Amino acid sequence: MTTRIAILGGFLGAGKTTLMIKLATELADSGSTVGLITNDQGEALVDTQYSRSKGFNVAEVLRGCFCCKFNDLLMSARGLVADHKPDFIIAEPVGSCTDLQATVVAPLRMIYGDEFEVAPLIVLMDAGSLKEAAPDPETLSGYLRKHQVEEAEVLVLSKSDTVDAGDIPALRDVLRRYNPSAEIITYSAVSGEGAKAVLDIVRSARRSGRSPVDIDYDRYAAAEAELGWYNGTFRFTLPAKTDTYDVALKLMGYVSSQYGDADLAHVKLILRSEKNALKMNLVNGSVNVDGVQGSRYGEGASSLNLNARVVSSPEKLAEVVREAVKLALDAPRVEVESYDDTCFSPSRPNPTHRMSG
Ligand SMILES: Nc1nc2c(ncn2[C@@H]2O[C@H](COP(=O)(O)OP(=O)(O)OP(=O)(O)O)[C@@H](O)[C@H]2O)c(=O)[nH]1
Ligand SMILES: [Mg+2]
């Protein structure tokens, strides 16, 4: 008996977690059992907390991407199978990760094909970012993002609601030029467009069958190393009726003021108090509230979990985030009681397996 596994790749902030939860919700509503796997270079993941808050069984692969922690990915998938017998596993690799065909899909297919049936590799590309500029392979980030598109078997042109409908054909043409063989699905989590088409692929019997695409690991490593990678958790006590939306917005505002929009790949936070919880994201300079449990007003023992991926030195990013938290808590006159954080630049990818197909 094999378990079907679908991998959702794509750059930081492209909408992977949002789509993963949407797919898992639809699958669960139609009677299937689903397990999710999240992944990060660090620990204390907003994506895991958020996915668990939606009621899903989530396993984590921490301190490295799926390719470098392939055995952890395998253990996580096997753990979900043993504990929950899922019909489907949906796995979200780190957004700065590519070469997934060679390092994750091919090993799963070729070595562990009796345990896992691997769906075609799905890669998201944010329509708004693509409209601003197609990935330029002469830049490090453009090189990485272009490779992500090239190795996809299904390309999801995500956040279609953020561009004019008239822009879509030209954006699809850009994707088709980079990857003529992939199926392209225009998708929006807001309007629901395309969600069923992605779901149909996940629950079909279609299997991944694509060969890996060549990549220069020096450039790939340099692209990842441009990023500062911050994960932190802060604890404090909020007075009654603190406007947590205001606190989170001030925090994002300060981080945003210290960097150019294009450098802010993704900053995400969950602020949880005894009365409420709030998730806020900042992608390329735009703030989004992803969810509120309870009202916007919180109080009592509270925690703030924050993940930031920004083109920055890790030293500067850590300083900026700590200052942002301090400033945001200034108005309710709250002091941080304890915190635990790390900030680094991702190290050179060193995959467990690398197969040519
Ligand atoms: N307008 C719009 N926003 C979206 C859509 N999909 C996701 N978002 C928002 O984009 C932000 C980032 O979404 P995530 O799903 O967290 O992105 P991700 O790819 O998982 O990000 P990383 O895990 O950091 O790589 C969130 O605020 C989402 O609500 C969409 O279709 N339209
Ligand atoms: Mg995510």
Image (spheres, helix red, strand yellow):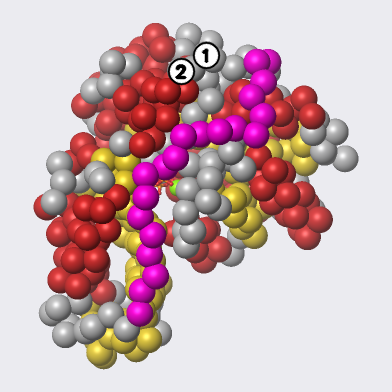
**Residue 60 highlighted magenta (yes or no):** no
Can residue 196 be seen by looking at this rendering?
no
Is disc 1 placed on a helix, strand or loop? loop
| 130 sits to left or right of 106 | left
Q: Main secondary structure of the magenta part?
A: loop
Residue extent of the magenta highlight: 338-357
Ligand 1's image quarter is top left
Badge 1: how crowded within 10 Å, few (<14), some, or many (20+)? few
Determine which quarter of the picture holds residue 124.
top left
Looking at the rendering, in which quadrant would you find the N terminus? top right
Can residue 247 be seen by looking at this rendering?
yes
- Residue 333: image location, x then y, percent: 16, 85
Name the residue located 15 percent from the left edge and 71 percent from the top edge.
327
Name the residue located 35 percent from the left edge and 55 percent from the top edge.
343
Foreground disc of the pair 2, 1: 2
Which residue in the structure is indicated by mark 2? 216
- Residue 86: image location, x then y, percent: 75, 51
| 202 sits to left or right of 283 | right
Name the residue located 26 percent from the left edge and 41 percent from the top edge.
311
| 37 sits to left or right of 298 | right
Is disc 2 placed on a helix, strand or loop? loop
Viewer-proximal residue among 321 and 351: 351
Looking at the rendering, in which quadrant would you find the C terminus? top right
Name the residue located 15 percent from the left edge and 58 percent from the top edge.
253
Looking at the image, residue 299 lies above or below residue 319: below
Which residue in the structure is indicated by mark 1? 214
CB of mark 2 within 8 Å of CB of mark 1?
yes
Looking at the image, residue 315 lies above or below residue 190: below
Q: Amino acid at mark 2?
A: Asp
Q: Label 2, label 1: how many angstroms apart (C-alpha)?
A: 7 Å
| 332 sits to left or right of 209 | left
Q: Amino acid at mark 1?
A: Asp
